[in-house]
Amino acid sequence: MNTFIILAGGQSTRFDGDKLLERFKGETLPQKAVLFALANGAERICMTLSHKQIYTDGKQIKHRVLEDMNDIYPVEVALQDPSRYGAGAALATWQGHGIERATVLFGDNLYKGVLPPMADSTALYYSTITRDKPDARNLQLAAVKDGIVIEKPHSIVSGDYFAGFIQMPSTIWKLLPTLRSSTRNEYEITDIINNSPNKKQVRLEDCDLLWEDITYVSDIKRINEIV
């Protein structure tokens, strides 16, 4: 089964507001991630959400990220443990839910285009982007050097950076319980990549795929120009 997991349980700590609720031409980034998954053949879409966007209208318990979502696709939902932070913890929420191989997207990223062929079912594929021009903005991304993904904070202002997605084999589920929190007190997706015995880099420059992320309010203009 072609399964996608969308991680949308972030805290938006560097964004003035909730970036998961920001709309771009009428759609949030989680909604656009669902549309991207469907366009790439998704048969099952799972989404990790935070407890903090839960509210009630007096009749039902609702979640702000899911507003209008059923109009697109009825995603399966799991809530991230509020005591565990980071993308690794968000992914671990789906442990024991019958998922084997899966493509993992980030709910605060923008994806457009077609995923490349990833034929090796035993490999963990991770996408990267090359930014040759030194730029302080690159410090927001995890750097890739000599096949190792280096989590923030780092001082690498140009080169290759982790960007976009991973496709993980079923063996990763055995790895997740062994993860330890980082110095940032987060369970990092980069640890999953680095500890995978068979990992393969996918360069976005070689794909028919556009990717961008949003970290600060100042990024809104850039995303709007793309969509």
Image (cartoon, rainbow, N blue to C red):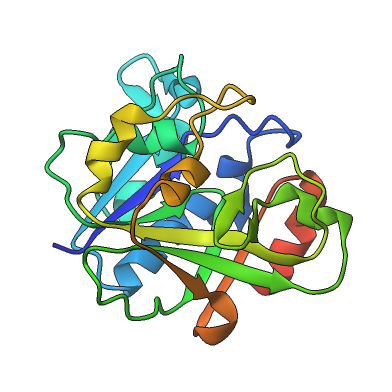
Closer to the camera in the image, 162 or 146:
146
Vertical arrangement, residue 9 with respect to residue 207, above or below: above
Closer to the camera in the image, 183 or 135:
183
The x and y percentages for residue 106 are: 48, 50
The x and y percentages for residue 210 are: 57, 75
Kindly identify the residue that appears in the image at 49 percent across and 48 percent down: 107
> Which of the image's four quarters has the N terminus?
bottom left
Kindly identify the residue that appears in the image at 74 percent across and 39 percent down: 153
Vertical arrangement, residue 55 with respect to residue 112, above or below: above
The x and y percentages for residue 213 are: 64, 56
The image shows a total of numbered marks equal to: 0
Vertical arrangement, residue 58 with respect to residue 202, above or below: above
Kindly identify the residue that appears in the image at 37 percent across and 26 percent down: 62
**Residue 82's quadrant in the figure?**
top left
**Residue 167's quadrant in the figure?**
bottom left
Vertical arrangement, residue 186 with respect to residue 132, above or below: above
Whether residue 75 is visible here, answered yes or no, is no
> Which of the image's four quarters has the C terminus?
bottom right
